[in-house]
Amino acid sequence: MFSSLRQIKTIAGRWLLVGLLFFSFGLWFLPFGFWGCGGSTEDSEDGSTSPEKDATAPTLSTLKDSSGNTLASTGSTVRVSSSFLFTFTEAMDTTSLSTNTVTLSCNGTAVTGKVAASTDSDGIADNEFTFDPDANISQRRSCTLTVVGGSDGVKDATGNPLAENLAYTMTSGCGSSDDFSNAETLANCFVFSNSSNQKNAAGGSSGAAITLASERVKLDHSTDFISVENGFNTVPSLAKEVSGDFSAEITFTSMFLEATTTIVGIGVAPTMGEGTSNLLLCGQVATGCSTTTYTSGTLAAQGGSSCALTEVAMAGSINLTVSTSITLRVVRSGTTFSCFRKAEGQSSFTQIGNNITQPNLSGNLFLAIYGASYGMGGTTEFTADNLTFNSGSAVEQD
């Protein structure tokens, strides 16, 4: 009997030892996921597992305008016709990007637009979006583009919100066609030659008044001197700086030219400083039209009376009042320039003179709305509308 008890104790002891060994073995391997795959949990009856949930907030990797320029958080200039492309670092919840979470305001006024997913360009689905304003942005405005973060903002595909609001500040450029609809356009999209809105190549001047009426700019200029620089004076000018080749035109809706030596037109010059010594002018005078160059004291003109304006002729001089519109165009190709004219009712432009090569007119130039008197006193008054670039554009302009 005692022998049997000893056998039972021996067997029990061995099983106890085996149990203790297994228990110790399990404790040793438990941290290494011996009982299952580390970092995962069973979430179904068949024992399948799901990956650990993404908890990383999305970030905006780039913001570009529709010209492909990457915008800095401050200091960028955008075209008035621009739209905006956002690229995030990961797939986003597309429903979280809307006009409530992506906003644009310019000078404190909201700009309406549409937010939409963009075509994939980087191999990551649902991470690129556009904001497209419903209309062109107003010229020369201080604008802020905001992407809302936080619980009410944009989120990634797993629901993580953008950590904070993102704000990009920028300035809108100038339009490709100026209707001179407000003083702000004139002040910000044009360069005035000096504080008096005029520049004197020689002699004195009684000045020039620049006013706005019916979305047109009116220049009223009178002179009472005889210029000493070959009788040519460049007073006054409104101008835009232009780079590269271009084709630009402007319409003169009315003009008053006193005497045969007054001229209005569209001019090209390398600088808007006083005493410009190199320029080209596509102009209309009372007795005709001309393509005029002025190079270091030498004045040369070609054209003639084929486009003369003869509505009014007064004894002793020509005092010409024109109420029909006249459009002048200047085309640049390198240092070669061509001038064209079209009167109201005409279907096509006619070249004034021949092409002119002007080596001194290279690099960036100023395209100017022009009024001048030369050779004798006279008054030049005209109303201009819609300076338009058919090709090329002014610096910082759409």
Image: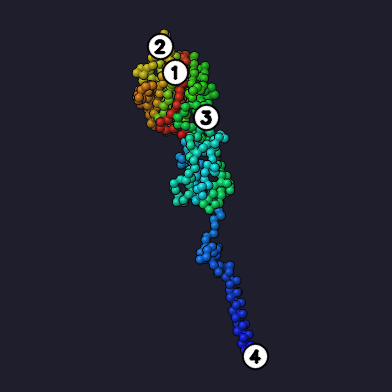
**388 relative to 261, above or below:** below
Earlier sequence position, callout 3 versus callout 2: 3
Residue found at x 51% / y 52%: 157
Q: Position of residue 213 (x, y in %)?
A: 50, 22
**122 relative to 285, above or below:** below
CA distance for labels 1 and 4: 137 Å
Mark identifier at residue 188 = 3
Earlier sequence position, callout 1 versus callout 4: 4
Disc 2: CA contacts within 10 A as few (<14), some (14-19) or many (>=20):
some
Q: Position of residue 125 (x, y in %)?
A: 46, 51
Q: Quadrant of the N terminus?
A: bottom right
CA distance for labels 4 and 3: 114 Å
CA distance for labels 3 and 2: 39 Å
Residue found at x 58% / y 72%: 26
| Front-most of residues 271 and 56 | 56
Disc 1: CA contacts within 10 A as few (<14), some (14-19) or many (>=20):
many
Mark identifier at residue 2 = 4
Which residue is under mark 2? 313
CA distance for labels 2 and 1: 14 Å
Three-letter code, disc 1 = Met
Residue found at x 54% / y 43%: 101
Earlier sequence position, callout 1 versus callout 3: 3
Quarter-of-image position of residue 267:
top left
Disc 3: CA contacts within 10 A as few (<14), some (14-19) or many (>=20):
some
